[in-house]
Every structure is written in structure tokens, then in C-alpha cells.
Amino acid sequence: MSTTEADPEFTTCESGPEGLQILEPRLVPLGGLRALNVRRTLPQRARSLIGAWCFVDHYGPDDVTESGGMSVNGHPHTGLQTVSWLFDGEIEHKDTVGSVRTVRPGEVNLMTAGRGIAHSEFSTPDTTVLRGAQLWIALPDHERHGEARFEHYTPEPISLAGARVSVFIGSLMGSTSPVRTATRLVGAEIRIEAGATVTIEVDPTFEHGILVDDGRVTVAGAGVGQSELLFVQAGPATLTVTAEQGPARILLLGGEPLNERIIMWWNFIGRTHEEIVEYRNRWQAQAFGEGDPGAGDLPYGTFPADWEQLIPAPPLPGGRLKLRP
């Protein structure tokens, strides 16, 4: 997924019980006149990272006959991994390392950008309702200049009393995903029956975020509603989640603190203003013939033959880009 915000406004965090933070979503249109509206909770001005998770978009349920669904032409990424997880509908992913894959509910697409990749994402013609989450992971400094790659995985759900868990990143509750990340992370969908309480054993060295897709939950006295993201600092060895009134569906995201400061602008993650300028210039040169792209003339890989349109990078802001805390 591409973000259209070059210089976004940020919302603030609300303090919750025991130092928990509830990150409120803000609405961001994705696309043109018939935009798919996404609800973005990360990054925030007060919080840029949860572990190495650096970007959380939640969307749907979206009637694609009204919005046109997801229609994101070829665009670049550097220094990150993208994670696509769906609740309803289908999306076709196509990238410049030759991957063509349809992601469906209960499956994960993980794309590692490394030093440069480009991809497109379109909801399939059979999709009538689209609902899901698009997530980014910041690569640590020692991994961010590596080779681009793509992985797909379908986790086998595990059943607990009152809950069903699908682990798509890392390890949780005896289930382990084989997709490769550069730092220790966890990502899981958890469906909780109405009124049920589930206690999840977690790594106490991880920071965690709980994104509510559907319903409303309570965690350590904090009530969390649809599209809100609850941040839980490192320390607890368990998280207890209760579905209020009706059933609930959440994403549990977590990881060891990255302990690195990053610059995230448009679809690029770097460490200096100059790096971001270089990434932008390379994209504009390869995609639109604006100058010399360098890096063997194809810094973002070989474009698929059927890509008819590409997304241009927005203008850089007037001042220097700054590292996020």
C-alpha cells in the first residue's frame, strides 16, 4: 500500500489505565475520486513504533461498488517490510521481483523492500466487500540494504476456550510463522466469542499493540473500540482481553524495541534526509525518466509488463526531514 501523505497531521495519544495508551485513528483517503478510506493509527506524533511495527492502516468493511475497492498502481518502498492481512475480500499483489499473488482472508503477504522494490495492489473483480489491515515493519540498520523478497503463508488457526488465534508473524501460544523478519516480532489475529475472556502469554520484553477490527474489548481496564490501537509497554508476561457484549476480532502486534531512530517519508524509510532525497530521485528517474536512476539503472527492480501507470513521488517538504523519536 502507498501512503499519499508527504507531511501528515498527527493525532495524539490518550492515557489509559496503568500507563496504557489508546491511539485514535485518523481518516486518510487512499486513491482518487472514489477513494478507499483507511483509518491510520500508527505513526502518531507521540508514538512512531511498536517494536519495529511503524505503520498501521485499518480499512473496511468497504463496498467496492461504491469506492472502487483497492486500486494502488506501481509504487516504491525502501527499508521496510509490508504485511497484508485481510478479513474480507481479495487483493492481487504484483511486484518487481516477479511475484504475483492473491491474498485472501486468513493468509499473509509479506514483502521485504530492502534497498528497493516496487509493487501494485488491486482488489480482485470478484471482491464485493473489502476489509483488512496494511502494516509496515521498519528494517533495522544492518538489514535495510539487503535484497528484496516476497513471502506468502497461510497459518493454521489454533482454538482456545472462547477464542481462535491465527499467528502470521513470529510465535505465539505454540504456533510459529515461517515468514522471515529481521527483528523479533509477533502478529496474530484473535477472534473472541461474545463475553469471553482470553489470557494470552506474551514475551515480556516486547512492546505490544492491540488493534480492534470488530467489536469492543477491555484490556487491563482500558476499553478499546473499533479501529483504535492500544499500546502496551514492555513488561507484562500476559495480556487478558475481554470481548464486551458481542464477539470481537483483534490484531495483536508486538516486538522487541527497535532502539533506532528512523525517517519515514512517503513510502521510504531511511536514516538521513539525504537518503530519502536519493530514494525519491531514483524512483522518479526509473519510473518517469527524470534524471539518472543509478544502482544499475533499475534500483526498484523490473516493472511488470502490464503496469500502465505508476505513482509519482510527492514533492519533498521545504525543510529537512527529521528522525522520529
Image (spheres, rainbow, N blue to C red):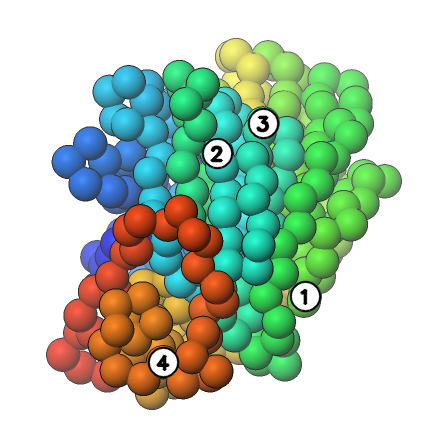
Q: Of label 4 and label 1, which has the lower sequence position?
A: 1
Q: Of label 1 and label 2, which has the lower sequence position?
A: 2
Query: In the displayed structure, would residue 24 be above or below residue 165?
Result: below
Tell me the residue that label 1 is attached to. 183
Callout 3–callout 2 Cβ contact below 8 Å:
no
Q: Of label 2 and label 4, which has the lower sequence position?
A: 2
Tell me the residue that label 4 is attached to. 293
Residue at point 64%, 15% (across, down): 193
Callout 4–callout 1 Cβ contact below 8 Å:
no
Residue 91 tag number: 2
* Position of residue 321 measured from the top left corner of the image (x, y, whole percent): 28, 79
Q: Nearer the viewer, mark 1 or mark 2?
A: 2
Query: In the displayed structure, would residue 235 be above or below residue 324?
Result: above
Q: Secondary structure at mark 1?
A: loop
Please, what is the three-letter code of the amino acid marked with disc 3?
Pro
Q: Nearer the viewer, mark 4 or mark 1?
A: 4
Residue placed furthest toward the front: 305
Work out how far the residue at label 4 is from the one at label 1, CA to CA, in angstroms: 30 Å
* Residue 27 falls left or right of residue 70: left
Q: Nearer the viewer, mark 3 or mark 2?
A: 2
How dense is the environment of label 3, judged by Cα within 10 Å: few (below 14), some, or many (20 and up)? some
* Residue 324 falls left or right of residue 188: left
